[in-house]
Image (cartoon, grey):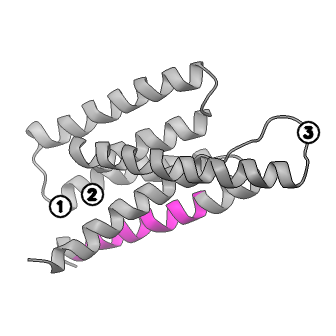
Amino acid sequence: MTGDYFAYGLLAALAIALLVTIVTDIRDRKIYNKIVLPIALGAPLWWIATGEPLWPDMVVHLIAAAFVFLLFSLFFYMRVMGGGDVKLFTALALWFDWVTTTRMLLYATLIGVAVTGIFWFEHRQRRRPGKVRVPYGVAIAVSGLIICGERYFNHFAR
């Protein structure tokens, strides 16, 4: 099996994990460690399969993920984001360079606004008591899927 096939297999596995995350976050309002951990552990395999050098690329991935973790831990501390969301963002940041990670964060923000609106509207329509619980992992996972799709389909463009 060549490195390209292995890399595409890893992207496919990431996409499947993100789809499972979407389903479980909508259903249970929880992002499970048994999904996030394989996503994080798959990143070094992705680095190797795509031929990224240890310095500086792999180190930059780790720095970007640490920055994402610190930033979103602040949001967790402020109680505007769940711990699973922080872990999922961090695990996905391991996969991508800092420019792509920044784009993913932008996508997640825009998609998150739509997800929040949809679930707020549904909460109001059903007249449920209390605050609306937004499954923000949906926005994170969809943004990751968009990035995965770009990586897969853009290699055909010239």
Would residue 134 appear left or right of 143 to someone viewing this image? right
Mark 1 burial class by Cα count in 10 Å: few <14, some 14-19, many 20+: some
Front residue of this view, candidates 51 and 95: 95
User: Splitting the image into 4 quarters, where does residue 51 fall?
Assistant: bottom left
Tell me what residue is drawn at x 13 percent, y 52 percent.
Answer: 52
- Where 90 falls versus 117 (above or below)? above
Distance from the alpha carbon under mark 1 to that under mark 2: 6 Å
Mark 3 burial class by Cα count in 10 Å: few <14, some 14-19, many 20+: few
Front residue of this view, candidates 133 and 16: 133
Tell me the residue that label 1 is attached to.
Answer: 50
Residue type highlighted by circle 3: Pro
> Disc 3 vs disc 2: Cβ atoms closer than 8 Å?
no
Of the image marks 3 and 1, the number of the one nearer the N terminus: 1
User: Splitting the image into 4 quarters, where does residue 156 fall?
Assistant: bottom left
- Where 77 falls versus 158 (above or below)? above
Question: Which label lies toward us, 3 or 2?
Answer: 3
- Where 18 falls versus 133 (above or below)? below
Tell me the residue that label 3 is attached to.
Answer: 129
User: Splitting the image into 4 quarters, where does residue 63 fall?
Assistant: top left
Tell me what residue is drawn at x 59 percent, y 32 percent.
Answer: 81
Would residue 88 appear left or right of 99 to someone viewing this image? right
Tell me the residue that label 2 is attached to.
Answer: 46
Front residue of this view, candidates 68 and 49: 68
